[in-house]
Amino acid sequence: MVEPSLNSKMGVAETIIFFVFILQGVWCGYWSISLPEKIEALSGSCVTINCTFDINSEYDNDLTDSAAGMWYKYDNLVFDSRNPSYNFKGKIIGKLKSKDCTTIFYDVTSNHRGQFFFRIEGNGGLKWIYKQKSALIDVIDSPRNPTLQMFKDAMEVQVQEEVLEGSSMCLRCSTKTLCSSSPPTLTWSSTDRLHLNDSSRLQLDQQNQTEIISDLNFTATHLQHGVTFICTITYQLQQRNITAQNNITLRVQCKNKSV
């Protein structure tokens, strides 16, 4: 078997390096977009499409503050940032010059249900519709029930609803917000009308969606045995308020015997 010469080895290496640079030129600074695959929207509320994009680097100078963003539902133009009242009322809340196309649509109806594609237009030859990826909006008539979890002591998840008297407890109610500009409220109540102290906060989940969380912290006593704790989510819409609930019933054991 003939050993390849040093020159031939160098030729192979140079060829590999050449193709690496070619691939970098193809994938770096090219047309790409990041969108959530599916978004749930509440009828009568608003919906946010988290969106970032990239363009071919040769058009970087054409992406200025005067750039416009458009949304197509399937093949039909439904939103144009140059005319926010056009068809679907909304606003691009991201900065297009920074390649942030995050958009909010107001007054959601069943007409918002469908597949959405983004288009960018700037100066010169910057005109591109991102057909390779879309966001699917699904419109629901009522919100999902909030999620309830029970933790004890050092935030250990408690699967069963039976706890030991004296345990430090946390009941957590959470839900994804379907309208970032007008998030819902979470409120606690109980069947025995106990005095409840809760704390609420907003945070981003792993899908970069805004989530509202309300924690109810207390020390378990026999007074809470058999009490049902109820978490209610309320959306304030233009015409009405709409709610959904979830609940959990506590069983408290005395340290020496069952209650």
Image (tube, rainbow, N blue to C red):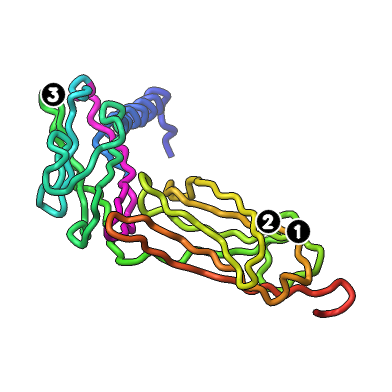
Q: Is 6 located above or below residue 241 in the figure? A: above
In the picture, the quarter occupied by the N terminus is top left
In the picture, the quarter occupied by the C terminus is bottom right
Q: Are marks 3 and 1 in contact (CB under 8 Å)?
A: no
Q: Are marks 2 and 1 in contact (CB under 8 Å)?
A: yes
Residue type, label 3: Asn
Q: Quick check: 183 left or right of 153?
A: left
Q: Which residue is mark 3?
A: 123
- The part of the image, by quadrant, that contains residue 217 is bottom right
Residue at figure coordinates x 21%, y 51% from the top left: 116
Q: Which residue is mark 2?
A: 217
Residue 257: percent from left, percent from top: 87, 79
Residue 148 visible in this rendered orientation of the protein: yes
Q: Which residue is mark 1?
A: 168
- Per the rendering, the mark at residue 148 is none
Q: CA distance from mark 2 to mark 3?
A: 56 Å
Q: Secondary structure at mark 2?
A: strand
Q: CA distance from mark 2 to mark 1?
A: 8 Å
Q: Secondary structure at mark 1?
A: strand
